[in-house]
Image (cartoon, rainbow, N blue to C red):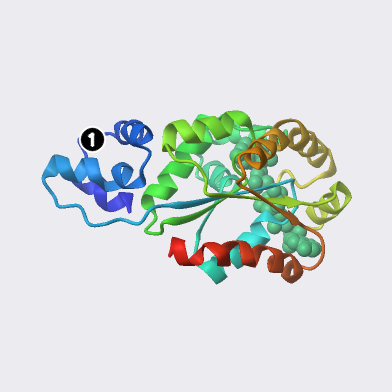
Amino acid sequence: MWRRVASLSSSISSSFLAQTASRLNTWESLTTGIAQQAKGVIAPKEKTPFITFVLGGPGSGKGTQCIKIVETFGFAHLSAGDLLRREIASKSADGAMILNTIKEGKIVPSQVTVKLIQKEMELSDNHKFLIDGFPRTEENRVSFEQIIGVEPNVVLFFDCPEEEMVKRVLNRNEGRVDDNLETIKKRLTVFQALSLPVINYYSEKGKLYTIKAIGTEDEIFEQVRPIFAAFEQTVG
Ligand SMILES: Nc1ncnc2c1ncn2[C@@H]1O[C@H](COP(=O)(O)OP(=O)(O)OP(=O)(O)O)[C@@H](O)[C@H]1O
Ligand SMILES: Nc1ccn([C@@H]2O[C@H](COP(=O)(O)O)[C@@H](O)[C@H]2O)c(=O)n1
Ligand SMILES: [Mg+2]
């Protein structure tokens, strides 16, 4: 979506677009309106974005359920953790800092994570986004609103007992540097202290859908399905 625009508007910085869109608070202005007006191109009707934040503690099953939501409802899946791990793998300038932060179970500066999410959104042709593992902190949340200029439509919270989360993470076997007991304990502390306030914020805004994240993957998805089914007509 933004990719096509970017080629038309190299002289217009994305931060200028984001700032303007933040004021107008519409995706259309953010993506095509300004750039195309500047070039005298007639803007096609773009779809309004539909943003879902997917929250929950480490191992609560966010990634597993996102795969099912993608298969069933055609969303684009953006995992903040995966984007950060990709930065480490690509040996980018921030790679070493990100690796140390993840090993410590801490939170990477919001500016870094939001820029990675923004880039993925710009490259996507989809207008329906699942943003998995974000926002983890109030700072993450505010930074997204400031840089991207939109708020989520839906926030999912996978509510899972700690004991079950620890068991799942220790059995995950994907070679992640943070899948060890020491880091899991730190991540659980960070979740309680920094992520739960974000979840409470969205609950107060009436955007939170809490899923009881115990049972089989399919049983859990049967709680998720009706949430997206209810929006399907309007979202497209
Ligand atoms: N309902 C379930 N029952 C048992 N195991 C599950 C269930 N859902 C997911 N798992 C397994 O638990 C592990 C963690 O799941 P997943 O990676 O989806 O969690 P996550 O919330 O994305 O965790 P993280 O925040 O650490 O990325 C995986 O190995 C996954 O296969
Ligand atoms: N918004 C975020 C998301 C993740 N991190 C760091 O990555 C680690 C792994 O994240 P997962 O979503 O894959 O569990 C996480 O523990 C953080 O260190 C982050 O900083 N900010
Ligand atoms: Mg995950």
Residues 139 and 50: in front is 50
* Disc 1 element: loop
Position in image of residue 8 (x %, y %):
19, 47
Look at 73% across and 43% down and name the residue there.
Answer: 178
Residues 17 and 178: in front is 17
Residues 172 and 140: in front is 140
Position in image of residue 75 (x %, y %):
50, 61
Q: Is residue 80 above or below residue 105?
A: below
Q: Which residue is mark 1?
A: 12
Look at 15% across and 39% down and name the residue there.
Answer: 38
Q: Amino acid at mark 1?
A: Ile
Position in image of residue 77 (x %, y %):
53, 57
Look at 72% across and 57% down and name the residue there.
Answer: 61
Q: Is residue 130 above or below residue 13?
A: below
Q: Quadrant of the C terminus?
A: bottom left
Q: Is residue 6 left or right of residue 26?
A: left
Classify the position of ligand 1 by quadrant: top left, top right, bottom left or bottom right: bottom right
Position in image of residue 2 (x %, y %):
32, 49
Q: Quadrant of the N terminus?
A: bottom left
